[in-house]
């Protein structure tokens, strides 16, 4: 009888030891997996980019100024007037976007032109490597895109814009400056002058009427819907893109 109890105790002890060891190993493996930086699939060379857009003009990166001459281009990441307070784009940087977004902006610009208005572009396609630099400076998803996911800008499917008077080039009054991450930049913030509310709504209305999606926390940011499912992340630099536009 005593021997049976001893054997049972040994069996329970060994079972308990195996279970605890398995849990610790599983937790350790899960924790290591969680801690490892995630690198999404990114196209970082011209050859793979050309394969990815073969036969699909809607996916080709287009120089926006070439397609829509009336656009005002002022790339804020070519200056220090941005949230990282650094120049992130080189001197050859220009505004590029996927063909579908470029054509949409062309339609919008034509409609605005009848009102004496136009679009000013603060940012469009953004190389993935730039997003990684931004994240090092501000690793906060409220203000910067997490490289583990990438952004609409990295896909060439997002644009940051405001409205301008075509006759003067002057910007219409908006809630905040570009890259302002206060509540005033949110679309649902209403403690603003009527003129500002009108201008923000005018921009939002014409962008959404043409199929673009607003970002709730940034009045200037619009993108193609379901961009993550439709377009690959890209890390082509502006020198490479300039060469591609020539050929």
Image (cartoon, rainbow, N blue to C red):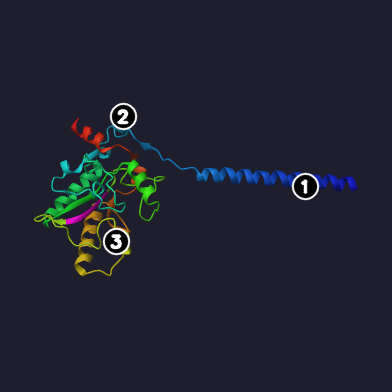
Using the numbered discs, state the Cα–Cα distance from disc 3 to disc 2 in whole angstroms: 39 Å
Please give the residue where the numbered disc 3 appears in the rendered image. 185
In the visual, does 120 lie left or right of 149?
left
In the visual, does 116 lie left or right of 244?
left
Residues at marks 1 and 3 touching, judged by CB atoms closer than 8 Å: no
SS at circle 2? helix
Q: Main secondary structure of the magenta part?
A: strand
Q: Quadrant of residue 181?
A: bottom left
SS at circle 3? helix
Find the residue positioned furthest to the left. Answer: 167
- Indicate which disc residue 47 carries: 2
Q: Residue 150, position in %: x, y?
A: 37, 45
Q: Quadrant of residue 204?
A: bottom left
Using the numbered discs, state the Cα–Cα distance from disc 1 to disc 2 in whole angstroms: 61 Å
Residues at marks 1 and 2 touching, judged by CB atoms closer than 8 Å: no
Instruction: State the residue in front, 108 or 42.
Output: 42
Pick whichever of labels 1 and 3 is earlier in the sequence.
1
Q: Residue 199, position in %: x, y?
A: 20, 62
Is residue 161 on the magenta stretch? yes
């Amino acid at each position: 009888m005593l021997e049976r109890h001893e054997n049972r105790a040994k069996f329970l002890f060994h079972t308990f030891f195996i279970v605890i060891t398995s849990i610790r190993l599983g937790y350790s493996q899960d924790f290591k997996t969680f801690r490892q930086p995630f690198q999404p699939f990114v196209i970082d060379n011209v050859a793979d980019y050309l394969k990815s857009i073969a036969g699909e003009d809607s996916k080709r990166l287009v120089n926006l100024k070439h397609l829509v001459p009336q656009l005002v281009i002022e790339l804020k990441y070519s200056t220090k007037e941005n949230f990282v307070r650094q120049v992130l784009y080189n001197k050859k940087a220009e505004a590029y976007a996927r063909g579908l977004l470029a054509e949409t902006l062309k339609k919008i610009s034509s409609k605005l032109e009848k009102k004496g208005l136009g679009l000013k572009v603060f940012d469009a396609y953004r190389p993935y490597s730039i997003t990684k630099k931004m994240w090092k400076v501000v690793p906060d998803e409220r203000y910067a895109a997490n490289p583990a996911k990438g952004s609409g800008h990295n896909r060439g499917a997002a644009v940051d814009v405001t409205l301008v008077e075509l006759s003067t080039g002057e910007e219409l009054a908006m809630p905040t400056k570009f890259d302002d991450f206060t509540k005033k930049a949110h679309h649902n913030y209403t403690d603003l002058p009527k003129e500002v509310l009108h201008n923000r709504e005018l921009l939002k209305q014409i962008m959404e009427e043409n199929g673009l999606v607003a970002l709730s926390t940034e009045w200037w940011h619009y993108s193609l819907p379901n961009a993550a499912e439709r377009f690959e992340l890209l890390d082509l630099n502006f020198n490479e893109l300039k060469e591609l536009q020539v050929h």
